[in-house]
Amino acid sequence: MLSSFFIKHKASADLADKDGRTALHLAAELGHLGITQLLLEHKASVDLADNNGRTALHLAAELGHLGIMQLLLEYNASVDIADKEGITALHLASRRGYPSIVLGSTYWELGDYQNAKDLGVIVVEKCKQILGEDHLNTICAIGNLGSTYWQLGDYHNAKDLEVIVLEKCKQILGEDHPDTICAMGSLGSTYRQLGDYQNAKELEIIVLEKCKQILGEDHPDTIRAMGNLGSTYRQLGDYQNAKDLQVIVLEKCKQILGEDHPHTICAMGNLGSTYRQLGDYQNTKELEVIVLEKRKQILGDDHPDTICAMGNLGSTYRQLGDYQNAKDLQVIVLEKCKQILGEDHPHTICAMGNLGSTYRQLGDYQNTKELEVIVLEKRKQILGDDHPDTICAMGNLGSTYRQLGDYQNAKDLEVILLKKYKHILGEDHPDTIRAMGNLGSTYRRLGDYQNAKDLEVIVLKKCKQILGEDHPDTIRAMGNLRSTYQQLGDYQNAKDLEVIVLEKCKQILGDNHPDTLHTMHLAHIYSQLSTKRPQNI
């Protein structure tokens, strides 16, 4: 090849003819991808302009050489250089109807979403100017920009664009066109990311119905739509509908894609998560054991998805009360997270918290405390004092201090925790009420019965109002207040509450439930104490 010969003999790649055109201009114009690659590898200047102000990208864009356009962009060719007539490569690409497909996708493939976004904004503007608002390429460019915002986590901007795309697709292409259905699915996914599960559900039901009608039950897009709707049902707390869909998705993935396909394994994990929400930990465990085994075989022990699967199984073992197996897995997960992701990665901190919770279940409060102190410190450093995860870490450590009998440290944390919950969540949020109850219990342990009573009276009142008389938390709040009344020597109020608590335990839990038996035992003790109280002389 002559080009290779000249380059081998150190000829300059940037020599220009009388029209100012270099070898790169000619290769781009003629569509010679290999020569273009060779020239770029040997440092040809990608943005040199000829006498008319045109770069190699201008020529490739004008003539529709898509591969060369993409290659030039990978070598950082500018899309904004204007020729003598003020025309850029972006203008030329827009006229041919593939601006976003080529220009934006290059950055996308490189994972450079910020540059993809910056370019996408320009592409949309140029498409509107040159092609008009309703041209299909303009709509495509808007959709691509929305997808880029989505990748950047800017779901609000993604939603705003996707609403436009869906509306235009409906108007121009009709309700049943594949692009319209795709736009509907994209918007549904964005609603899910924004926590707007109701709107997500409404769109995803339509998408699934249309996919079934147009593509059939076994088409990959239909199965994907079914999985998306299942995930949304789970987020809405509709675990039964989620399970029903996810069972079908898993079965179809096995039939069509095979047992070891990534989508099949993912579907298995999703169904396992739903079983966990339903409290069906045995089925959860059986699926998660398979998921972990397949992740190890296909991805290896150190892949993030394998570590995630290990963490999920560890959590399920904990739910089943199999704390030793939970601990064994979670120790490995934490070690791998530290090695691969680093000490400060969110997954590492989460793994530390999970292991701490398991140590607590094993009664190993010292190890629990050591981990939770680190978790709280890292949450503060990385997320700030008021982030929900920081506040949760504070509550966990407070509970551990209480278990260790370190009531002063428990109180110090729980006072801060309650203040933050009131400020961030409001007085009536369940977490605020729970924090109030915990602080009340700590005051009681410290012998500060008056402060304990003041809090527990509020907790009981709020539990009755919000949860109802028969909710377990209400009954628990009643029992706590009864204990405090007893410590204050207010035996009549203690007895009145005791009668109610015992009656509700019998009604709701049965005569032989441990909580009922415990309450009966306490009632007997309090009865004896009340008969021995000092008499006035």
Image (cartoon, grey):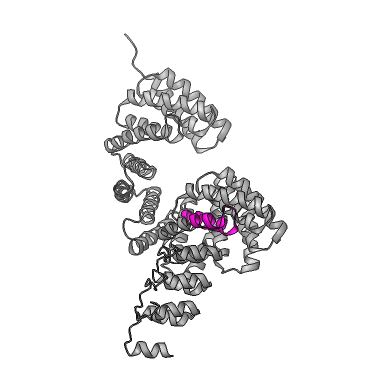
In the rendered structure, the answer to whether residue 213 lies left or right of residue 228 reads right
Q: Residue at x 38, y 26 (%)?
A: 455
Q: Residue 123: x and y, percent? A: 48, 58
Q: Quadrant of residue 258?
A: bottom right
Q: Residue furthest top?
A: 537
Q: Is residue 425 above or below residue 185?
A: above
Residue farthest along the right direction in this orientation: 213
Q: Is residue 146 magenta?
A: yes
**What residue is rendered at 43% in x and 72% in y?**
72
Residue 370 magenta-drawn?
Answer: no
x and y, in percent, of residue 191 in the image: 54, 47
Residue 253's spot in the image, x, y percent? 62, 64
Q: How many marks?
A: 0
243 or 514, nearer to the observer: 243
Q: Is residue 225 left or right of residue 103?
A: right
* Magenta region, residue range: 124-151
Residue 264 against residue 438 in the figure, above or below:
below
Most frequent secondary structure within the magenta stretch: helix
Q: Residue at x 36, y 78 (%)?
A: 44
One can see residue 113 in this view: yes
In which quadrant is the C terminus drawn?
top left
Closer-to-camera residue (362/202): 202
Q: Position of residue 338 (x, y in %)?
A: 33, 61
Res 446 quadrant in image: top left
Q: Quadrant of the N terminus?
A: bottom left
Quick one: 75 or 20, which is closer to the camera?
Answer: 20
Residue 523 seen from this side: no
**Residue 43 sits in quarter:** bottom left
Q: Residue at x 49, y 57 (%)?
A: 126
